[in-house]
Every structure is written in structure tokens, then in C-alpha cells.
Image: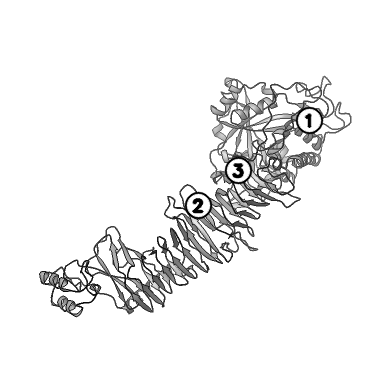
Amino acid sequence: MLIAGCKFPVVVAAILGVFALSCAPVLAQRSYGIDVSAWQGTITQTEWNNLRNVNDQEFVFIRSSRGGTTGYYNQSDSDNSEGQNTLSQRYDDPFFVQNITRATNAGMLAGAYHFSRPDIVASTQNSGGIANSGTDEANHFLEMAGAWMRPGYLLPVFDLEAGDGIRSDAQITQFSIDFSNRIYEEMGVRPIMYINGNYSAYVVQAPIQDYFPVLWVARYTGGTNPDPSIVESIHPKDTYSPFYGPWDDPPAATHPWSFWQYASTGRLSGYRNGSAGIDVNVAQGGTEFLRDHLVPALWVSGSDGNWSTLANWNSGQPPVAPVQGPGQVSRVGSLTLPSVRLPGSLDTVILERSAENVTVTLDSGNHNIRKLVTREALNITGGTLTVNYTPVAESTPYSVLVSSAVSLTGGALSAHTVQIEPTKTFTLGGGVLTFDTINLAPGFSGPGSLSLAGDVILAPRNGVTAQVQRGAGSGATGGVSLGGGTRTVTVGNGASAVDVSINVPMTGGTLNKSGAGTLRLTGGNTLDGAVVSQGTLLINPSGVDEGVGGDVQVLAGATLAGTGRVGGVVTTNGVVAPSSVGLPLMMPAIEFGDGSELALDIASNVAYDRLLVTGDALSIDAEATVKVTFGPGYTPTFGQTYTAITGAGSVEGLFGEVVTNGPDMVARSVAGGVVLEVLSGLAGDFNNDGAVDGTDYNLWASNLGGPASALLNVGEAETVDAALYTIWRDNEGATLPAIASAVPEPAGVLLGLSGLMALARRRR
């Protein structure tokens, strides 16, 4: 897959979950580690603690074994001058168990390695005429370290540095492949290859890289105790182009290594107070990169089953204790085996069976894992599943990869980034989904999609806007389907102004927006309709002619806001708030009911919110109000008018009140809509022209006995009566500075708005 221009080869049993990065410039600071064997003798727990906490060594590879399952090897007599090395020259490292126990207790990521002996052939002294095989050596490795080839430990390692000149290149390659196949058969993972430049460039052959997708290379930088900073940004191949052999053959990564042993003479204060040399290594990435090289949590059952059943997981299998072979040096220290457990907080969980189709059900308990990859069906019906990984450049761009049918019908799922692969569907039928981003991967055979089969609660993580969006790639864009029903989407009110934003089309049903938070729709939606029961439904599409199809009902206390077009009639007892200054919210008809509110922001004489009713009826209850918020720095003058609603084929009723954070205003129904006017505030100025004169008297007289709404600047008066005459008489002759504004004619309003619409289209 390609991410931000970089290539990540994906590996696992069928997909291992290891991601070898080829774009070093985007990585975090590299992590450092060591490798040890019996040659280092006893390393105390204090030394291990200091290696981790003082020397900042994050990982270690520990030798468990060498050679095959038979015979004996004296590591102090490698040329067999004493004739004690026999058969497949088995060697069980007596310090392995103590080292891996103490290293993990110190907080290091640890794994086992096996030193292979393809140099032992039929003609080798004391071999009994039997050549070592990769399969037999893997069996030895499994006997001694199989208990630690499980989640929580680094992938097992095949150490290849013997046999050249004794076997052919093809034979060594096949020996290695046989070793990998045996480990994979038993453990479901491919081992790491440890190799030097001579073997990688000139001995092993393709397709070796398919069987050892993770590469640990040995190339020394020279000198005693080299400064680790010299390998912070360079690569083994920089001075020797053939170094990686088949591992960097196109289209592979330019620098495909994951680990680099850059010296055997490192000095670390935590080991022998810095007086002795030790092998030192660097990873091509930081902590998350390292965690990608842990053994994943694999579903090992060939049948449907429950997430909480230990026996369904490789982490839940009872570990088999290693048994020292005949004549081997006795184990140093006590034997401590890993505990059986369910997948945990450092585990990448992979649901995949190569031979069966299974369904995994999570129905109870609280589970916390690092990543989740689904190749088999997953049903979350209860309990909670938290996926804690937040994407970084050195690892995967997702926390959850949906490559199968996944459903959430109860309980809760929390993950930062969910990626839904092409043709796959994540079905939400209930429960709580907490997320930062859901990427719907496009595809020519069909995109990834979300399907709402029931009511669901959506919640953002960490107070930021949660986004459902088109993922990277080519092909058709996915969407959110309501399946033809009415679906309640509840969104809580978080720290962000917008809590959840759905940036792809929402189709096929009626949306009921619930919860105090804000749900934003920005795609070209073809909903049958919507009900805004609570909180805010914000329509902010990419173009002004997109929004929500069908009728929309806004209940008391709820808000419909934004821009774009509503396809049907809007009926509101709540708030309608066009929310993009200069762009209208459009609908064919709207009914402002009892207690409803039209909320408008006004930034200047020409920049303000408005509604466009596209030809049908505008109905206004007398108990409906207009709420105006003037922008900072803008002070309107009396008589200034604003066309709040336009385009209606008919207008019935009048807003009963206008509430502002500035000067008093009045709403007047005119042909096609509603105009707001800033009042002079001058008592007796019934026509709002800034002067109390005979024209105002005539207006009073012609409306005597009628509703006070026919006059302006009347305060709380309800009827045109003698009290208003007294106000006029007492203020006759009062004036304010003249203004040049006038109520625009309806035709002029429409012409101006059509120009605005043309401008909006040009901006798309």
C-alpha cells in the first residue's frame, strides 16, 4: 500500500502485521537495542534494568539454540578438534530463559534467535552421514523458544551466517525457506532473517524475501564503541549498493531493513559498567515501529467462537516448557514461562484463517488492544473494545483495518482511525462508536462503506471533530447507508464546535439526529428526510445545491444550521440558523411554528446570513422570533435593512419579536420574504425615518385601533391607541441624522441574491 508517498510491505501469517518502512526521512528517532547469548554470561537484573532505563535500549534478541535436534556442540571447540561435536550439533543456550525473563522484567521488547548450521552436511565429521535440514533446525528452535513465540515478544529470528562454500546458493536458500515454512506452520508467523552483506548479496536467492519479509542486517560501521548517532539517519546500503540482495529488488523498498547490527564492540554502562563489548543494533523507526515487530495476536481456532475464550488465541495456548537435550549444559536460573492471556494493549490482533471462514463474537468484558485487522467476520454485541494505537508515519495509517464483515450492534468500540477496505461494509446496528477518522477506501469494484442497520451513538475521541471521509485511492466513493429505515444517530456535545462530520454521501432512509452535539453533513446526500430531535444538524456541503433530500422537522430545542439545499419542506419549532455569511440555506418551503427561531449573524451591511425559499410558501407563527448577532466591529445605523428571507411564492404571518445584541430591530414581511430593519429608537418615529413629524401622525391615525406592529419604534405597545398618540405629541420635532438606506424592492432582492448564488457557484 502507498501512504504519503512511502511503501509499506505488509506481512503476516497470511498477513503478519509487520510494516517495514522504506521512507526513512519521515520516521521518528530510531530505537536502539542489543543481542546476547551465552557468550555474555550472566547478566544481572540490575544490569538489564540499567540497559533499559539508563542506556535506553528498547529491544533485545536473545539466542536460544543452534543446530538441529540431535547430537552435541561445544561452542568452545567450533572446529571440533576434540571430536565432541556430533550429529546435527545441537546446542541449547543455557542462559536463554534467564535472559528473556530478566529483559522483559526490565521493560525491554525481547525475542529469540536461532543460529543455523547449514554448514553441517553428510561429510561433516561425526554427522552420521546426515546433513542438517532447515526443518529439523526449526524444530529445535521451537523446542527451546516456542513458548516465547507469542504475543508480547518480538518475532523469532533465523540467524544465517554459515554454510557458504559447503552448500550451493540454491541449497542454502532452500534450507532457509524450509526453516521459515516450519515456523509458519506451527506459529502462523514468518521469522526475521539475520544476515550479513555477503550472504544477502551473493548467497541467498529470490524468492527468499517472501519467506523472510523482515530483515535484520549486520554491517559494522567500524571502530570500537561507535557513537550510535552515526546510524541515526544512514543505511547499510549507502556505501555498498548490492547489500540487500533480493530484498530491495523492484518494486520493493529502497532500504528494506528493519534492524541493523552496526557493531559488535559497543560499550554500554549498564553492561559490565561499560568495560566489555556487546552487539549493538538500531531499528529503522521508533517505539511504534518496534511494536509492529511483535508477534501478533492470532485467532487460532478453525471455528466460530467468542473473543473472551482463551483457547481461541495464540496468546491463550499453554506454553510448552523447553527441555534441555541430552548432554547439554544445565539451564542457568529458574524457569519462568509466559502467562496465558487474551490479546492485550501491545498486541496487533489479526482475525484470519486460511482454510476456514469463521465469525468472532465479542459480547462482554473490557478489552484493550493496540491494532485490529479483520479478515474474518467480527460481531461486537456487548462489552467494550478499545484499540489504542494512534497512527504515526513510521507505522500503519490505521488503527482498525476492516477487510471483512464487521458489525457493532451493542457494547462499544473505540479507535482512532478505522479504514474500511474496498467492497467491505462496517455495519452499525447499535452501541457506541468512538473514533477520530473513518476512511472509506474507494474502489472500482465497489468502495468501502458504512451501513446503519439500527440506532447508534457516535462520539469523537479527545475532543476533536470525528470525520467519516473518502480514503486515499481511485474508484467510486463510499457512503453511509441508512438501509431505507429511520435511524437515530446520537452525537454527544464535546469540546469541538462540530463533534461528528460525515463527509461522504448519506443515503437511503430518514435521519433522526439526537444528542446535544453537532452532526455535520458535507456530502451530496439523498436522504428521504430528517428529524432534528436534539442538538444541531449542520448542513455544510461542498456546493450550495447539495444538502438533505426530503422534508426536515426541527423539534423544540434543536437546531438546523448551515448552507446548501433541503429537498423538502422544513417544519420547525426549534432553531433554523443559516451559518455561512453570504451563502443561503435553501428549501422549497418553510414553516416557523410556535416558539421557533431564525438565528442570523450579520457581519456588515452586505455580509449576513439568509434563507432562500425556492418558490413555495413561507409560513410564520406570531410566537416565532428572530435572533440577530452583530459581528465584532460592526455597528449598524438606524434604517439599515437586511433581506433575511427571500424567494417565497407566498408569505403568511410575521415574526413576533427580533432579539439582538445591538440596536433594536423589526422584522417585516414583504413580497417574497422577510426584511429586517434597524430601528431609530426614537419614540414617536412610527415610520423609522429619524424624525418625529406629521407623517408619523398620519401613520398613527390611519392605523388607530389596529395592531401596533403596523408602526415602528413603539416599544412594548400592542395596539395603536391614545397612548401612542401621546408619545408622538411629546416628541414631535425630534430628529436623528438622516440616512440613505431604503427597503429593497423584492425584484432587487432576488437580483442581488441571484448574483450571490452565481458567485457561490464560481467558488465551488
Side of 232 where 465 appears, left or right: left
Please identify, in this view, whether the residue under mark 1 or under mark 3 is nearer the observer: 3
Side of 481 where 189 appears, left or right: right
Q: Position of residue 633 (x, y in %)?
A: 27, 58
Side of 466 where 2 appears, left or right: right
In the rendered structure, find residue 365 and report the number of the disc placed on it.
3
Query: Does 253 sit above or below residue 668?
Result: above
In the rendered structure, find residue 286 and report the number of the disc placed on it.
none
Side of 229 where 446 appears, left or right: right
**Which mark sits nearer the N-terminus, 1 or 3?**
1
Report how far apart the C-alphas of labels 1 and 3 lie in the structure: 44 Å
Tell me which amino acid carries mark 3: Gly
Q: Position of residue 172 (x, y in %)?
A: 79, 38
Residue 226 image-quadrant placement: top right
Judge the density around disc 2: few (<14), some (14-19), many (≥20) Cα neighbours within 10 Å.
Answer: many
Report how far apart the C-alphas of labels 1 and 2 lie in the structure: 55 Å
Identify the residue position indicated by label 2 in the image.
459
Q: What residue lies at 53% left-to-right and 41% top-to-bottom?
A: 28
Which residue occupies the foreground of this view, 227 or 417? 417
Tell me which amino acid carries mark 2: Ala
Q: What residue lies at 54% left-to-right and 28% top-to-bottom?
A: 53
User: Which type of secondary structure does the marked residue at label 1 adopt?
Assistant: loop
Identify the residue position indicated by label 1 in the image.
67
User: Which type of secondary structure does the marked residue at label 3 adopt?
Assistant: loop
Query: Does 649 sit above or below residue 234?
Result: below
Query: Does 230 sit above or below residue 455?
Result: above
**Which mark sits nearer the N-terminus, 1 or 2?**
1
Report how far apart the C-alphas of labels 3 and 2 lie in the structure: 20 Å
Q: Position of residue 101 (x, y in %)?
A: 65, 27
